[in-house]
Image (spheres, grey):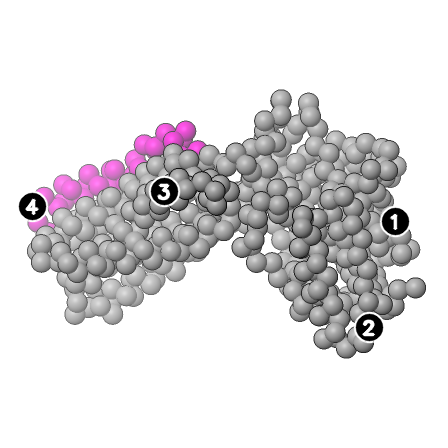
Amino acid sequence: MIRPGFSIFLISAAAISYEILLIRLLSIIQWHHFVSMIISLALLGYGASGTFVALTQKWFVPRFGVFFIGNATLFGLTMVGSFIIAQQIAFNPLEIMWENRQFLRLLGVYLALFVPFFCAANCICIVFIRFKDQIHRIYRFDLLGAGVGALLMVFMLFKFSPATCLKILGAAGPFAAALLALSLHVSWSRRAAFGLMLFGCMAPFIWPQEWVSLRISEYKGLSLALRAPNTKIISEHFSPLGWLAVVQSPTIPFRYAPGLSLNCSMEPPPQLGIFTDGNAFSPITRYDGNREHIAHLDYLSSALPYHLLEGPEVLILGAGGGMDVLMALYHQAKNIDAVEINPQVVDLVRRMHADFAGHIYQKDEVMVYLAEARGFVTKGRKSYDLIQVSLLDSFSSSISGAGALNASYLYTVEALQEYFHRLKPGGFLAITRWLKVPPKDALRLFGTAITACQELGMDDPGQQLAMIRSWKTTTLLLKKGVFS
């Protein structure tokens, strides 16, 4: 076993954990499409380190211990420090097309977040050079560390907030440095190891909480909602699937009814808002068991298929806070299978706010499944009168273009064909989307549906397709049969 084996294990584990954590952090404070930025940051750090160590190895290899310990310690410090600095840079990706200063700010974010990966890679590179005859063993520790680090971060995100995970990761660098110092067997190494271990134990607590608190973009839905008087976050929940913030707004209530007809004369009941990563919105609507109090749901474009069916068996993909389940209950659906990928969202409706939501997820006709929507359809065998794909993304992200890089496999040709196969004869597939200007999403979805129909062998898809629009949404219907 090489001397720095466990140190390399720790460095690799922390580096991959930090990379995954940055994806979560930047998804919250900015948007999800920073995933590719984080991957490029890691590659930039490792590439720059390889060049740096190759050019300077004759100075640093003789000072291997000092170089490794210094970089490992800096790695731990800069993981937290670089993110704090990056948050201070007023970078707004929504302005980048017309304000040139945003490119400089993006460069500043890159330079700040690049440093930890550079330091981690310096540690790994110098070990490769110092122990070149044992590269296979170094790789073993490196790859094992990366695998454990990836799994560890997934578990940590279930237990701690992303900001707390960041502070905990900061301890990995000093501990890796301490392990190497213990293996050096020189006069100063044991004292250094003791000091580094002490520093590692203190590292999660030395950073003030306000320094690492997440500063969410002022253009995200949660930031806009919190500007209303007396609006507050009443609970927060963390997982690798997203940061959920449950918001109460008593003074200016939420009235989420996308595309509600201007002919609707009744007011929607009070709602709690669930924001995912500060943006994607799903309401929990107050329901007291009286169907008339949720009659406004019949004025949405997504209610169309219920006027063409009687007592249907319904599959809802993307149940969220339960608005589409309420719509099915209002129209007296016989059976409702609701699919939701995030167990914490289901727990909010089923347990924490069950009284507010009217215990809709415990009703006899409702069955809730924790699964990815398309995977559930592919593996299942049950057929339905109606398959409803919920309005999943936020309106603000759709019009800003922030969701342009968010690949969704719910709307592909193959997905539509899978949904079609799960319909009973005469059944409907209903997909509701936001209406953009120009209406590119609606046209693209309609074109996808035509292709799916043609590949299924339909000679005249126009006999089985229909699309309606409200002032803010469109709903596409695909019938397993011919429209009368």
Q: Nearer the viewer, mark 2 or mark 4?
A: 2
**Label 4 sits on residue:** 187
Magenta-highlighted residues: 184-213
Q: Dot 2, how many residues are within 10 Å of its Cα: few (below 14), some (14-19), or many (20+)? A: few
**Circle nearer the N terminus (4, 3):** 3
**Label 2 sits on residue:** 460
**Circle nearer the N terminus (2, 3):** 3
Q: Which mark is residue 332?
A: 1
**Circle nearer the N terminus (4, 1):** 4
**Would residue 436 be found to the left or right of residue 309 on screen?**
left
**Would residue 426 be found to the left or right of residue 281 on screen?**
right
Label 2 – label 3 distance at C-alpha: 53 Å
Question: Label 3 near label 4: C-beta < 8 Å?
Answer: no
**Label 3 sits on residue:** 104
Pinpoint residue 161: horizontal percent, then vertical percent.
47, 40
Q: Which mark is residue 425?
A: none
Label 4 – label 1 distance at C-alpha: 80 Å
SS at mark 3 in the image: helix
Q: Is residue 313 above or below residue 285?
A: below
Q: Nearer the viewer, mark 4 or mark 3?
A: 3
Q: Is residue 135 visible?
A: yes
The residue at the point 34 percent across, 37 percent down is 85
Query: Quarter of the image holding residue 250?
Result: top right
Q: Dot 4, how many residues are within 10 Å of its Cα: few (below 14), some (14-19), or many (20+)? A: few
Query: Callout 2, which amino acid?
Result: Asp
Residue 200 inside the magenta-drawn segment:
yes
Residue 202 inside the magenta-drawn segment:
yes
Q: Is residue 430 above or below residue 242?
A: below
